[in-house]
Amino acid sequence: MKIEANGQRPAGGERRGFTMVELLAVITIIMILAGLVLGAAAWASRKGDLARCQGRMQLLKNALDEYKLDYGKVPQGSYTLLYTELFSKPLSSGRPGGERKPYISDTNFLNTSKQFVDPWGNYFRYQAPGARNKEAYDLWSFGPNGKDESGSSTGSDDLNNWSSGH
């Protein structure tokens, strides 16, 4: 490229490359777009985990309802009884051919200690008779943060079977 004595390009000369300002502008735009995409992905992941937790709770509720149909009551006590009751005590009543099968067959959300866990790795809580559902049972998860926020005035990420919306 030809440069004149005053340090400037001649009129109509070729320009090669980008200026520093142009490069910074492009990098800034790319970073903003990446931030938006990552934020949306994190939001979608959280929503997916919440939906998965609600689905697992529904599986447990269905199994407990079927248990109640067979035995006339839900398993009494705390969550530790749940695995034994739902896997090893099925009756044959109402099943095709008198088949004895577990009340819940999805073992994908059991941990190595045979506890049902939510998508964040915390075990589901179960109590019967329930403190909130006195005639039935309480089933809940402490949610993504794994902390009991049932008494929180600022809101809670806990999921349960007694409040509306969950």
Image (tube, helix red, strand yellow):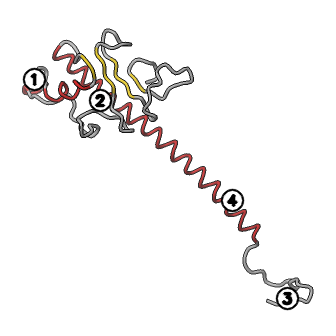
Residue type beneath disc 3: Ile
Task: State the image coordinates of residue 62 (x, y, percent, origin top left).
Answer: 27, 24
Residue 30 quadrant: bottom right
Category of crowding for the residue at label 3, using alpha-carbon neighbours closer than 10 angstroms: few (below 14), some (14–19), many (at least 20): few
Category of crowding for the residue at label 1, using alpha-carbon neighbours closer than 10 angstroms: few (below 14), some (14–19), many (at least 20): few
Tell me the distance, in whole angstroms, between the alpha carbons under discs 2 and 1. 19 Å
Identify the residue at image location x=20%, y=16%.
Answer: 69
Task: State the image coordinates of residue 27 (x, y, percent, origin top left).
Answer: 67, 63
Give the mark nearer the N terminus: 2 vs 1: 2
Give the mark nearer the N terminus: 4 vs 1: 4
Category of crowding for the residue at label 2, using alpha-carbon neighbours closer than 10 angstroms: few (below 14), some (14–19), many (at least 20): some
Above-or-below relation of 115 to 14: above
Tell me the distance, in whole angstroms, between the alpha carbons under discs 1 and 3. 94 Å
Q: Which mark is residue 59?
A: 2
Q: Tag 1, which secondary structure?
A: loop
Q: Tag 2, which secondary structure?
A: helix
Residue type beneath disc 4: Thr
Q: Is residue 104 left or right of residue 162?
A: left
Give the mark nearer the N terminus: 4 vs 3: 3
Identify the residue at image location x=46%, y=21%.
Answer: 150
Quarter of the image with the N terminus is bottom right
Q: Nearer the viewer, mark 1 or mark 3?
A: 3
Q: Nearer the viewer, mark 2 or mark 4?
A: 4
Identify the residue at image location x=20%, y=20%.
Answer: 67
The residue pinned by badge 3 equals 3
The residue pinned by badge 4 equals 28
Q: Are the residues tagged 4 and 3 within 8 Å (C-beta)?
A: no
